[in-house]
Amino acid sequence: MTFMVRAAVEDRGFEVSLSLGPTETVAVMGPNGAGKSTLLAVIAGLLHPDTGRAELDGRVLFDLTDGRGTWTAPHRRGTALLAQEPLLFPHLSALDNVAFGPRSAGVPKLQARESARRWLAEVEAGELQRRRPGQLSGGQGQRVAVARALAADPGLLLLDEPMAALDIHAAPLLRRLLKRVLARRRAIIITHDVLDALMLADRVVILENGRVSEEGPTRDVLLRPRSRFAAGLAGLNFVSGTITEHGLQAKDLAIYGQHDDLPGPLPAGQPGVAVFTPAAVSVFLTEAHGSPRNSFAVVVSELEPHGDRVRVRAGEGGQLSADITPEASADLGLVPGLKVYFVIKAGAVSIYPG
Ligand SMILES: Nc1ncnc2c1ncn2[C@@H]1O[C@H](COP(=O)(O)OP(=O)(O)OP(=O)(O)O)[C@@H](O)[C@H]1O
C-alpha cells in the first residue's frame, strides 16, 4: 500500500519525486512559484505532466514511460483535494454536499445520507447538515469540505493551504480537527505555516525552483535546516560556506561553532552551514574580544517588533538577525544604517554539513 509520484513539467521547470507511507502526512513548503500547486495538480489529475509515473495503492494514476501513456481520470484516482475555499455546491445542503461523492459512486440515497451524517458528526458539523453553503462561515464551510473529502474514502488526501482563507479564530479549530483526521490517513498538505507542519506533518518536503531542496522529519528540518528557506521558516540565522577545523568559512566571514551531532572533528573542506538563533546574538557598538566568540561587523537594515523583543536585521537583505530587548536597542541608539557588531558565542552556533 504505497503512493509514489515522479513527474516533470518542462515549461514550469518542475521535476519532483515523492513517495508516502500508508498513514504518513507530508507538509510541502516553499517560496511562491516553487511548484507546490503544480505537484498537487499533477497528482490530482488536473495537469498532465510531460513525463513520469504515479501509483496509489496499486492503481496507476499515470504512466508516461510505458509507451501507451496510461492516464487515469481525476475522479477515479482515489485522491481528494481540499482547497483554500470549500468549493461546495451552492444549491445543495451541507448533508447533500457530503453525500454527493458516495451517491456518484452508486451508493443508494438513504445509505449515502447516513454516511454523510456520520462524517459531518466526525468534523463537528452535525448541526449544520441542513444549511446551504451560503449560510456557513468560512470555518464551517471548510469543515463540511473536509467531511466531503473523507466521505469519498480517499487513499490520499491533498490539502492546498486549507487554513489560508480562515480568520485567526477559525484556523485553530480546523487545525485540531485535521490533526485528528490525518493521524490515520495518508495526506499531502501545502502550507506556509510552521505550526501546521509541526502539528500535522510527519515529514516536511521543501520545494524550491521546481525541485526538492530539502526533506526530512518535521522537527529535524526546522531544528537543523539545510536550506535557507527552511532556516527562514524556523526563524534561524543561516550562513552557508565551507567547513573548517573550527567552524565555517563563508566568503570573508570566519565563524566559530560546534558540530553537535557527529563525533570527532569537523569534516573540513566540505560544504556546510552555520545555524544560530537570533536570541543568541548580542549587539555591540564596538568590536568584542575574548573567549571563543564570533564578532561580525554589520550594518543595521531594519528594526521590527518580535514578541517582547526587537528584531534587528542586518547585512544585505537583512539576512542576519538578533533579538534584543527594547531597552538595549534604545541604549545602543539603533537605527537603520548604523554600523554595529553582532556577537555570538561559538557554543551557540551549530555547524553541520549541508
Ligand atoms: N497555469 C499555469 N501555466 C503556466 N505556468 C504556470 C501556471 N501555474 C503556475 N505556473 C508556473 O509554474 C511554476 C510553479 O508554480 P506553482 O503555482 O506550482 O507554485 P506554488 O509553489 O504553488 O506557488 P504559490 O505559493 O505562489 O502558490 C511557476 O514558475 C509558475 O509561474
Image: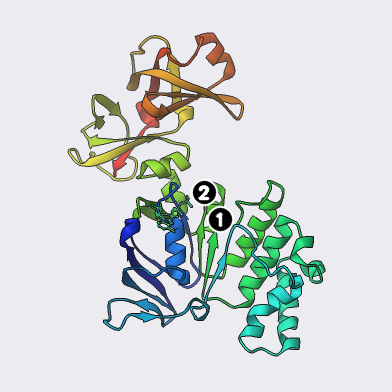
Q: What percent of the width, then of the height, locates residue 302?
A: 48, 22
**Residue appearing at x 30%, y 61% in the figure:** 10
Instruction: Between residue 84 and residue 119, name the one nearer to us.
Output: 84
Q: Position of residue 211 (x, y in %)?
A: 33, 55
Q: Identify the residue shown where x is 62% and y is 61%.
A: 178
Q: Amino acid at mark 1?
A: Glu
Q: Earlier in the sequence, mark 1 or mark 2?
A: 1
In this rendering, does residue 118 appear at all? Answer: no
Q: Quadrant of residue 102?
A: bottom right
Which residue is identified by label 2?
192
Quadrant position of the C terminus in the picture: top left
What x and y, as percent, mark residue 56?
A: 43, 77
Q: Nearer the viewer, residue 303 or 248?
A: 303
Q: Is mark 2 within 8 Å of ligand 1?
A: yes
Decide which of 12, 271 is in the foreground and name it: 12
Find residue 199 and report its image quarter. bottom right
Instruction: Please indicate whether residue 324 sits to the left or right of residue 149 in the image.
Output: left
- Image coords of residue 106 (percent x, y): 63, 89
| Pointer 1 residue | 161
Nearest the viewer among 135 and 18 is 135
Query: Is label 1's Cβ within 8 Å of ligand 1?
Result: yes
Report helix, strand or loop for mark 1.
loop
